[in-house]
Amino acid sequence: MSKVSIVIPTFNRAHYLPDAIRSVLDQSYKNWELIVVDDGSTDNTQEVLSAYKDQLVNIYQQNEGRSAARNKGNQEAKGEYIAFLDSDEVWLRDKLARQMTVFEEANSDVSLVHGYKQLVDEGLQPIAGAMQRLRRQYRIDEEKMETYEAYNQHACIFTSTIVVKKTALLEVDGYDCKMSSMEDLDLYLRLLAKEHAFDFISEPPLILYRWHGDNTGGTKSNLGYLEVYKKHLEICERFQCPSSIRKAKTLLYQAIAQTHYRLNNFRQVRLYWFRALLESTTTLGSANFWRQMLRINISN
């Protein structure tokens, strides 16, 4: 059984942290180490962690953000594989066992395995109708179409569901601490650009994802998407993506246009759709292109 290093970054979530830790301790897969990186918490996080002192590695650092905390955990990890668990989320009991079975049976190209999440409320009760919406979002994963190009257009993957080879993380230098949000999408794109293969486990879910007032969302998420997409416009040629660079650029321009559309930046929407069209006339086949152009022209 390969060793898995589990990294929990946390900041002022002492009230959620015991659920996350207990879900690791209860895993049916037993060859793991647990590393909790307290990113400068000012609540009673250290008091909570003291109750588990013999069951985990407790690392405290000044507040540097969740990417820095995850990278610190990576550096301290002794396992061949790294798994992440956000401190407000919960793993289901067979989460690691199911994923490590995939690694054991897959070819050596597979560097990351992930799966479904179950949306729950603060009391860990399922949110009605959430799974139906998620099934639509996971379409490319279910169809085994996880490529750099596809993830530039649409990605559905959540940090607490992944197990990744440590060597793959080291190759791409882990998380980019300069990213304000969506640093996970940036990481996945860099892994795919380096031709690391992903594998996906279908239902049942691997984790319980708490939905509460502190989740990243809305404007902050969209600004994070813009940051990631613009970064990858600059670096996709250097990464030498396996498919055509032009296709990757086309999808990036389209993604930026659609993100600006969600932010109601209509001038930027026109600009990036036009750039996508210059890269490839396949842009004319996008239903979103016609729908958004029509709405913008009507509103003006």
Image: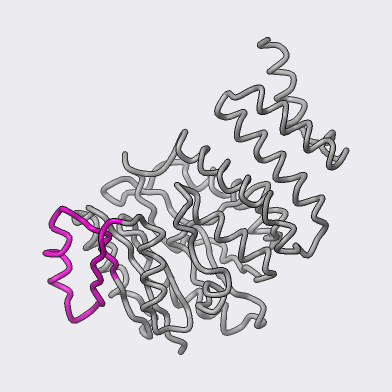
Q: Residue at x 65, y 64 (%)?
A: 192
**Left or right: 259, with 174 as reference point:** right
Instruction: Give the camera-side residue of 35 and 204.
Output: 35
**Left or right: 269, with 250 as reference point:** left
Q: Residue furthest bottom?
A: 1
Residue 216 drawn at (x, y percent) = 41, 43
Q: Residue at x 78, y 31 (%)?
A: 274
In which quadrant of the rendered view does residue 141 lie?
bottom right
Tell me which segment is drawn in magenta: 36-63
Residue 238 drawn at (x, y percent) = 72, 61
Vertical placement of 229 versus 173: above or below?
A: above
How many numbered badges does the structure rendering display? 0
Residue 93 part of the magenta-drawn span: no
Vertical placement of 82 versus 132: above or below?
A: below
Residue 178 drawn at (x, y percent) = 47, 53
Instruction: Give the camera-side residue of 79 and 114.
Output: 79
Vertical placement of 172 versus 288: above or below?
A: below
Vertical placement of 175 versus 26: above or below?
A: above
Residue 133 drawn at (x, y percent) = 54, 43
| Quarter of the image where the C terminus is located | top right
Instruction: Give the camera-side residue of 293 and 40.
Output: 40
**Left or right: 275, with 39 as reference point:** right
In which quadrant of the rendered view does residue 69 lie?
bottom left
In which quadrant of the rendered view does residue 270 lie?
top right
Q: Residue at x 47, y 44 (%)?
A: 130
Q: How is the image coloured?
A: one colour
Residue 57 part of the magenta-drawn span: yes
